[in-house]
Image (cartoon, grey):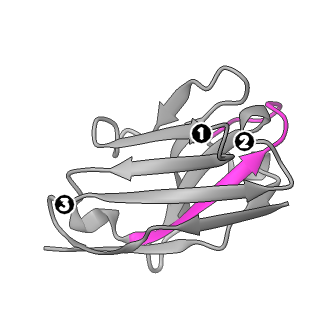
Amino acid sequence: VQLQASGGGLVQAGGSLRLSCVASGLSVAGATMAWYRQAPGKERDFVAAVHRILGTTSYADSVKGRFTTSRDNAKNTVTLQMNSLKPEDTAVYYCAAARTGSGSYTDMRSYDYWGQGTLVTVSS
């Protein structure tokens, strides 16, 4: 299984970026797909998830209303649309996949696979 994240970059505060995560060896429709982020010197935090099968979504309070995650089953891809970006959104963003729904979607230990991360920098 491989998860390939892309789309990071430098953007001014208030701008937008769209991250993508392409999965191989795993169906995004059958897995809970999540986005996490890790700022320098901080822990890796949950950002958003699209749940297996039904495709419902969940968000961290800090991004609710600004970020949207979705999946494209045909392309086996998950995206994270980030709008109204703030300097505090600066981090390396990772996509992750959990084959089963046995754990909490906000718990990193629930995820079986991780992508390599893509850097998002928001300037003020």
Q: Find out whether the residues at labels 3 and 2 contact each other: C-beta distance under 8 Å.
A: no
Q: Find out whether the residues at labels 1 and 2 contact each other: C-beta distance under 8 Å.
A: yes
SS for callout 3: loop
User: Distance of mark 3 from mark 2, alpha carbons?
Assistant: 28 Å
**Is 56 placed left or right of 121 in the picture?**
right
Q: Where is residue 85? Give x, y as percent.
A: 24, 58
| Residue found 19% across the figure and 60% down from its top | 15
**Is 32 placed left or right of 102 in the picture?**
left
Q: Residues within 10 Å of mark 2 (few under 14, many from 20)?
A: many
Check the image and name the residue furthest to the front.
74
Q: Residues within 10 Å of mark 1 (few under 14, many from 20)?
A: few
**Span of residues in magenta:** 91-105
| Residue found 48% across the figure and 71% down from its top | 42
Q: Earlier in the sequence, mark 3 or mark 2?
A: 3
The type of residue carrying mark 1 is Asp
Query: Which numbered circle lies on residue 72?
Result: 1
Residue 97 magenta-highlighted? yes
- Mark 1, mark 3: which one is toward the viewer? 1
Q: Quadrant of the N terminus?
A: bottom right
Query: Which numbered circle lies on residue 15?
Result: 3
Q: Is residue 41 above or below residue 34?
A: below
Q: Where is residue 56? Give x, y as percent.
A: 57, 24
The type of residue carrying mark 3 is Gly
| Residue found 84% across the figure and 35% down from its top | 100
The type of residue carrying mark 2 is Val
Viewer-nearest residue: 13 or 44: 13
User: Distance of mark 1 from mark 3, alpha carbons?
Assistant: 24 Å
Q: Where is residue 29? Give x, y as percent.
A: 73, 34
Query: Which numbered circle lies on residue 88?
Result: none
Query: Which numbered circle lies on residue 28?
Result: 2
Check the image and name the residue furthest to the top.
54
